Amino acid sequence: VATKPATCALPICGFCGDPGVGKTRLCEEYIGKLNPNELQVFRAYCVNSERGKPLHPFIQVMQAAFQLDQESCKKTAQHVVQQATHNTELDRYTEVYLRLLNLSDSNESIPQAELLNLSVNATSALLQHLCSQSTVLLYLDDWHAADEISQKALVNILTHCRDLPLLVLMATRTAMPELKYLRGRTVNMQPFDLSMSNKLIASFFGKQLSLNFTTSVHQQSGGNALFIEELCLSLPRNKMIESVHQRSEVPTTLQGLIAKRVNQLPGIKSNS
């Protein structure tokens, strides 16, 4: 991935690995180092198809692209979308955007298959329009949960934006060998080895600790960056620690880690 997305030879790069291995952190760190004046960044988060609607991640992109305020009334939001698409190549898709954003007042019935096809084309047209204004970085998190229509839309976007300044970053738990057909690549992220764990641990404490300690943390965390962080944050900073005991106090699953951090919030009492 290039320092500047506009110079990147790959239009799409997927980071694949187990939960907590650092996919999202790596993407966010990269985005955080970019100059916001040189590009537009759009973030979208996928949810399980049972909880989300078709094109869920790209509906988030539409909301951001049209700068819709969640507190705005329906009429105001309708006006914003209509003004944004008026006299542009997006004009033909105005009604599609309104339907996807639950803003349409139309009673006209459109066959499901036709509406889905229009939605895919409208999504691609929006990204092309955005890329005509400046470099665009599209970040898709938890892409393994993306619905089938979103996957189709992404292929459509990459096909039509082939020569436009677009870089797509994806974080996913499943490999995506199909990316090579889209001029992209998958980076398989593995748990840290002992040397990498040692460097991460040292960054938390501001100094190198004993091999005995770092080995203990590495073994208990399985080299998972998220669990290494949790272990380090749970240890007192005012004492030199040479070993890690009380293994049961550190969550061993992502759900357990979330529950522990929620219980540490002010006003939250643990039910354990």
Image (tube, grey):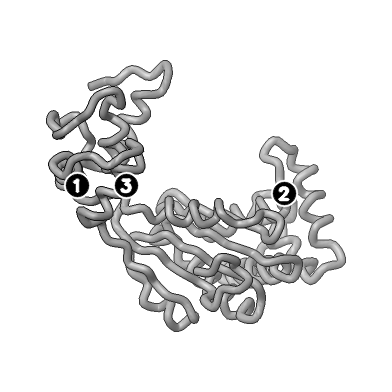
Dividing the picture into quarters, in which one does residue 122 lie?
bottom right
- Amino acid carrying label 3: it is Leu
Residue 260 placed where, x, y %? Answer: 30, 30
Distance between the Cα atoms at labels 1 and 2? Answer: 44 Å
In this rendering, is residue 107 above or below 72?
below
Question: Local crowd at mark 2 within 10 Å, few (<14), some, or many (≥20)?
Answer: few
In this rendering, is residue 74 above or below 92?
above
What residue is shown at x 65% (from left), y 72% (from top)?
165
Label drawn at residue 218: 1
Q: Residue furthest bottom?
A: 181
Please say whether residue 115 is visible from this viewpoint: no
Task: Give the label, 3 or 2, closer to the camera.
Answer: 3
Residue at mark 3: 200
Residue 241 placed where, x, y %? Answer: 19, 30
Residue at mark 2: 67
What residue is shown at x 38% (from left), y 60% (from top)?
172
Q: Is 160 left, or right, of 193 in this rendering?
A: right
